[in-house]
Image: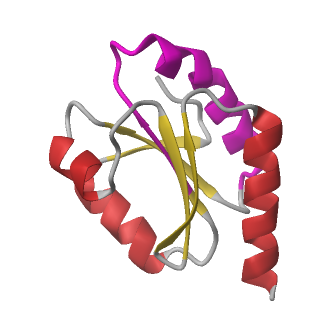
């Protein structure tokens, strides 16, 4: 389940966002059966609300898209990856705090402004 600010990505949406986004893209690689993924879900949603208009925040179900998970080197879930200009600039494995996500997205936003 996603908030109104969190998008649900499929393969095409992810590729489009990475190719076209002019702001940071945060992707939460998760699975519905994963307890730690459920723990981090509210943090992802709150981060999406906080960065509305400044970042794209999305979730990608690794069970529905195993080839993408493999392509992006996701070996454990949850994995949260921040992209800028189509390139990975930060990665968190496991449950991560909202403060850590905020710092990483703010740093990515500074790179956009530069």
* 8 to the left or right of 62: right
Q: Nearer the viewer, residue 74 or 63?
A: 74
**Residue visible at 33% across and 58% down in the picture:** 13
The quadrant holding residue 108 is: bottom right
Q: Nearer the viewer, residue 105 or 12?
A: 105
Q: Nearer the viewer, residue 49 or 34?
A: 34
Single out the residue that lies furthest toward the bottom. Answer: 114
Location of residue 96 with respect to 69 vertically, above or below: above
**Residue visible at 22% across and 30% down in the picture:** 63
* 87 to the left or right of 74: right
Q: Where does residue 68 sit, x and y in percent of width and height?
A: 24, 52
User: How many labels were placed on the picture?
Assistant: 0
Q: Where does residue 109 sit, x and y in percent of width and height?
A: 76, 70
Q: Where does residue 36 sit, x and y in percent of width and height?
A: 51, 17
Location of residue 24 with respect to 113 vertically, above or below: above
**Residue visible at 73% across and 45% down in the picture:** 101
Residue 114 magenta-highlighted:
no
The quadrant holding residue 71 is: bottom left
Q: Which residues are magenta?
A: 26-52
Q: Where does residue 53 sit, x and y in percent of width and height?
A: 71, 60
């Amino acid at each position: 389940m996603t908030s109104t600010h969190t998008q649900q990505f499929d393969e095409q949406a992810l590729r489009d966002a990475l190719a076209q986004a002019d702001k940071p893209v945060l992707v939460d690689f998760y699975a519905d059966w994963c307890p730690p993924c459920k723990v981090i879900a509210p943090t992802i949603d709150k981060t999406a609300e906080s960065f509305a208009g400044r970042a794209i925040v999305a979730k990608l179900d690794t069970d529905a898209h195993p080839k993408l998970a493999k392509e992006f080197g996701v070996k454990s879930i949850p994995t949260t990856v921040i992209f800028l200009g189509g390139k990975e600039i930060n990665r968190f494995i496991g449950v991560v705090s909202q403060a850590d996500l905020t710092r990483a997205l703010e740093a990515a936003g500074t790179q956009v402004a530069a």
